[in-house]
Image (tube, coloured by chain):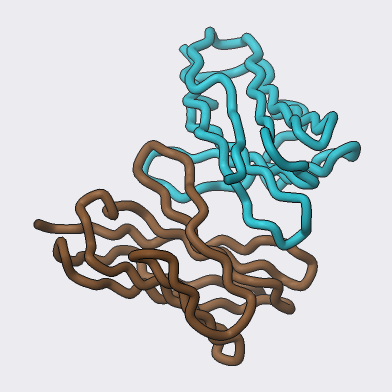
Chain colours: A brown, B cyan
């Protein structure tokens, strides 16, 4: 079956770096998305990877390894406002989206 | 950047009445729109997927006669909660995808529905 695995919760310190891992199993693959969702708000788009490698966008970077079915979201210079849930979403060969349950990131001062 | 407008942001209605929520893609054509529900401290739950001009595809356990979805154009989808009950109180979120099949989803700001 199709599946996404990501940690339920992570804690990090303000100013530090954190890596949120995601493994996926899908029928075919058309890319992987990361979204950020603050409590009580709708998700916002962070990144899309379809080719292997690292995509950097400011403090946030996303990595993909298609052969390993693996992605990570790297957040640098953490700020308190980065406390949120981070959703890993894979797209299969039929362009159907498979959602992870999200990783709740807690930033401590 | 891509913008999705969802209206209203919040609504309070009486039990038994119907509520309509609109989702518009403002600067792109949304070939597919998605409707979600989210209860406090829980993950997004996909309710249905709609493509312009065709009937929505509902997820298992979602009553299609209760949650009416209309995707009349490439920029507008509506969700109508019919005969609302207090247990329908939730945060409803739409997302729009387009113009390509692998375009990212862009989310509306959500609608907080309270049924009294």
Is A92 on the left or on the right of B13, as rendered? right
Vertical arrangement, residue A2 with respect to residue B12, above or below:
below
Give me the residue at 67% from left, 33% from top: B26
Give me the residue at 56% from left, 47% from top: B45
Q: Which of the 4 image quadrants contains residue A102?
A: bottom left
Give me the residue at 72% from left, 77% from top: A27
Task: Give the farthest residue toward the left.
Answer: A109
Which x, y percent locates residue A105?
29, 60
Quadrant in which the N terminus of chain A appears: bottom right
Q: Which of the 4 image quadrants contains residue A7?
A: bottom left
Vertical arrangement, residue B94 with respect to residue A61, above or below:
above
Front-most of residues B5 and B82: B5
Quadrant in which the C terminus of chain A appears: bottom left
Front-most of residues A52 and B59: A52
Which x, y percent locates residue A25?
61, 79
Give me the residue at 50% from left, 15% from top: B11
Which x, y percent locates residue A82?
29, 54
Front-most of residues B33 and B37: B33
Task: Give the farthest residue toward the right.
Answer: B53
Marker count (numbered): 0
Front-most of residues B101 and B59: B101
Is A33 on the left or on the right of B77, as rendered? left
Which x, y percent locates residue A60?
38, 66
């Amino acid at each position: 079956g199709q599946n996404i695995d990501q940690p339920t919760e992570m804690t990090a310190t303000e100013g530090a770096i954190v890596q949120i891992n995601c493994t996926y199993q899908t029928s075919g693959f058309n890319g992987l998305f990361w979204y950020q969702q603050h409590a009580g708000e709708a998700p916002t788009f962070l990144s899309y990877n379809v080719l292997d490698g690292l995509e950097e966008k400011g403090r946030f970077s996303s990595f993909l390894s298609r052969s390993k079915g693996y992605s990570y979201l790297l957040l640098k210079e953490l700020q308190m406002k980065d406390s949120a849930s981070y959703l890993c979403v894979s797209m299969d060969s039929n362009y159907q989206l498979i959602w992870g349950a999200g990783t709740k990131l807690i930033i401590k001062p | 950047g891509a913008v999705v407008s969802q209206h209203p942001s919040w609504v309070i209605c009486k039990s038994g009445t119907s509520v309509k929520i609109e989702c518009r893609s403002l600067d792109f054509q949304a070939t597919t729109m998605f409707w979600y529900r989210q209860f406090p401290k829980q993950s997004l739950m996909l309710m249905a997927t709609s493509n312009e001009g065709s009937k929505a595809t509902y997820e298992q356990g979602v009553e299609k006669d209760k949650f009416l979805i209309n995707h009349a154009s490439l920029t507008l989808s509506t969700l109508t909660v019919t005969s609302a009950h207090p247990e329908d109180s939730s945060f409803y979120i739409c997302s729009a995808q387009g113009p390509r099949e692998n375009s990212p989803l862009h989310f509306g700001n959500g609608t907080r529905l309270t049924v009294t």
